[in-house]
Image (cartoon, rainbow, N blue to C red):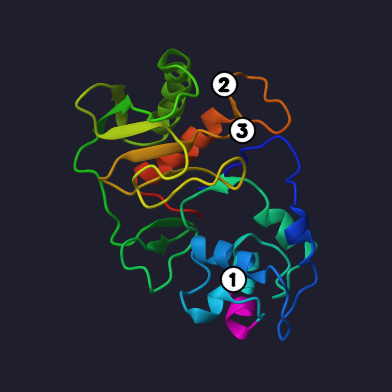
């Protein structure tokens, strides 16, 4: 599942822009942040070189995998299109999972990806509730948006959803470290994340500029689109 969340061109930071043109065999100040980005989303294996600014074979391979995944020109270099993609706000769930992470991996079937082992819900009627540690919008504002998002999945699957407690799915707004080992990073980059069945957690970054109306202004994030995307992860789908 992929989605367009933001109505604006991504803003490339000055520190990243200085890396444009970087390629294997050289050392570039700030290259470590590219390695950390690729590691966070599953392209770069954990090892000592990930903390240096040297452009090695591992980084070149990771960049090629990233470029291929997003249908960019596969160069193995840090070019402008790659920087633009890396600067685009996105879901926090990894795209691929390397062998160093045994907790969550994806399996590919046809054009769809699933969490490793294809975890599933053992029922088709799922309850959800709202619980946030940071206030962004009221439950009354959130409720119709989330209802529409769940209705999209209900029409395309065998699942039905209702707001009820006890719940199978708990969604809400949080900022920074919020108790799941995947801290949010403030405005931009990671917008939200969700977990595979039957975990049921769906978290939104409270520091984003969320839109709750049909009119999405520049630099706003469409909450409903993000909800539809993240519910796909809740149901077991990965990025494809």
- Work out whether 98 lies above or below 1: below
Tag of residue 221? 3
Q: Residue beneath label 1, please?
A: 65
Choose between 39 and 29: the one closer to the eye.
Answer: 29
Compute the Cα span from label 1 to label 3. 27 Å
Q: Are marks 2 and 1 in contact (CB under 8 Å)?
A: no
Q: Determine the image quadrant of residue 154.
A: top left
Q: Residues within 10 Å of mark 2 (few under 14, many from 20)?
A: some
Compute the Cα span from label 2 to label 3. 9 Å
Tag of residue 212? 2
Choose between 233 and 125: the one closer to the eye.
Answer: 233
Q: Going 74% across and 53% down the picture, which residue do you hit? A: 13
The label nearer to you, 1 versus 3, is: 3
* Circle 1 SS class: helix
Q: Residues within 10 Å of mark 1 (few under 14, many from 20)?
A: many
Sequence-first tag of 2 and 3:
2
Q: Position of residue 38 (x, y in %)?
A: 56, 65
* Circle 3 SS class: strand
Q: Residues within 10 Å of mark 3 (few under 14, many from 20)?
A: many
Q: Which residues are magenta?
A: 56-62
Q: Position of residue 21 (x, y in %)?
A: 80, 71
């Amino acid at each position: 599942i992929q989605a367009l969340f933001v109505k604006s061109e991504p803003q490339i930071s000055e520190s990243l822009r200085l890396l444009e043109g970087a390629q294997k065999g050289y050392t570039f100040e700030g290259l470590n942040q590219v390695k950390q980005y690729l590691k966070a989303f599953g392209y770069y294996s954990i090892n000592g070189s990930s903390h240096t600014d040297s452009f090695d074979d591992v980084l070149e391979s990771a960049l090629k995998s990233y470029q291929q995944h997003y249908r960019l020109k596969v160069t193995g270099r840090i070019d402008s299109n790659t920087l633009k993609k890396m600067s685009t706000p996105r879901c926090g769930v990894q795209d691929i999972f390397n062998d160093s992470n045994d907790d969550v991996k994806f399996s590919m079937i046809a054009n769809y990806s699933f969490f490793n082992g294809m975890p599933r819900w053992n029922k088709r009627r799922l309850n959800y509730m709202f619980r946030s540690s940071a206030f962004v919008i009221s439950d009354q504002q959130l409720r119709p948006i989330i209802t529409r998002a769940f209705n999209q999945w209900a029409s395309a699957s065998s699942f039905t959803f209702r707001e009820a407690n006890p719940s199978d799915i708990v969604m809400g707004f949080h900022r920074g470290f919020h108790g799941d080992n995947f801290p949010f990073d403030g405005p931009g980059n990671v917008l939200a994340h969700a977990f595979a069945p039957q975990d049921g957690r769906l978290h939104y970054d409270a520091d984003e500029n969320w839109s709750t109306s049909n009119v999405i202004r520049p630099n706003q994030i469409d909450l409903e689109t993000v909800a539809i995307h993240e519910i796909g992860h809740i149901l077991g789908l990965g990025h494809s």
